[in-house]
Image (cartoon, coloured by chain):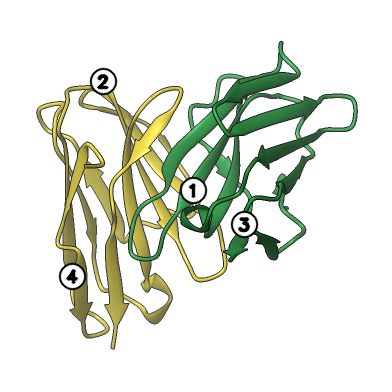
Amino acid sequence: DTGVSQNPRHKITKRGQNVTFRCDPISEHNRLYWYRQTLGQGPEFLTYFQNEAQLEKSRLLSDRFSAERPKGSFSTLEIQRTEQGDSAMYLCAYGDQPQHFGDGTRLSIL
Amino acid sequence: DQQVKQNSPSLSVQEGRISILNCDYTNSMFDYFLWYKKYPAEGPTFLISISSIKDKNEDGRFTVFLNKSAKHLSLHIVPSQPGDSAVYFCAALGGTASKLTFGTGTRLQVTL
């Protein structure tokens, strides 16, 4: 039990389609993070929320990406007009020191 | 610019022996360091951490050492067990940033 539920676990889509991922931390915490991991690399920071407020965004997060945390609990990450390079594992984490990760959503772009 | 580096992509150790995983960093603002373990198809699992005010932290079979002057940390696992076989990531936090900066990972294989 990771303490974080991510859905779907795997998403396959055609290039150009929009996709949305959801993250549900089991316990309430004011900080929630999104990371992306590609093959052979460590997770890379995308964005983080303090309650409902999105406080920091990486330059990796192009304008095709948008994240929300409307009630300060669950969060969604949407990618519009997906590209081949978006294929990766998208990880959600909550907490502070340490951060606790979910099992991720693997995105495959055909 | 890789601010956290794990220069050994893989390591093989016999069961019962010590595993030593290394990590170097370049950003002097980092003041908190973590090790995560990752199995295939799962997210990273927190293992152990150390603050920059310490040079050693121990938790059971796992010990992390920090050498601030060398900007180097290491994770020691003793004795190593087959269930320890996984990819290990070093990560760092620092300054006002809340984001973790990860290394590229070291794949540990513990053989019988």
Report which residue position mark 2 lands on.
Answer: A30
Residue type pointed to by label 2: Asn
Q: Secondary structure at mark 1?
A: strand
The residue under the point 36% across, 52% down is B43
Q: Nearer the viewer, residue B45 or A21?
A: B45
Q: Which residue is mark 4?
A: A18
- Which residue appears at 73% of the width and 47% of the height? B20
**Left or right of A21, for residue B58:** right
Residue in the picture at 54% in, 28% down: B60
User: Percent position (x, y) of residue B104?
Assistant: 62, 57
Labels 1 & 4 near each other (Cβ < 8 A): no
Q: Please state the chain letter of the residue tagged with numbered disc 4 in the rendered image.
A: A
> Mark 3 belongs to which amino acid?
Glu
Per the image, the residue denoted by label 1 is B37
The percent coordinates of residue B44 (x first, y second) are 42, 48
Q: Is residue A51 left or right of residue B112?
A: left
Callouts 4 and 3 in the same chain: no
Image depth: mark 1 or mark 4 in front: 1
Q: Tell us which disc is closer to us: 2 or 3.
A: 3
- The secondary structure type at the circle numbered 4 is loop
> Which residue is outermost to the bottom?
A110
* Residue A70, above or below A37: above
Q: Residue B85's spot in the image, x, y percent?
A: 52, 59
Q: Nearer the viewer, mark 4 or mark 3?
A: 3
Closer to the chain start, of discs 1 and 3, is 3
Q: Residues within 10 Å of mark 2 (few under 14, many from 20)?
A: some
Chain hosting mark 3: B
Residue B101 to residue B69: above or below: below
Residue under disc 1 on the same chain as residue under disc 2: no
The tint of chain B in the picture is: green
Name the quarter where the C terminus of chain A is drawn.
bottom left
Q: Nearer the viewer, residue B37 or B68?
A: B37
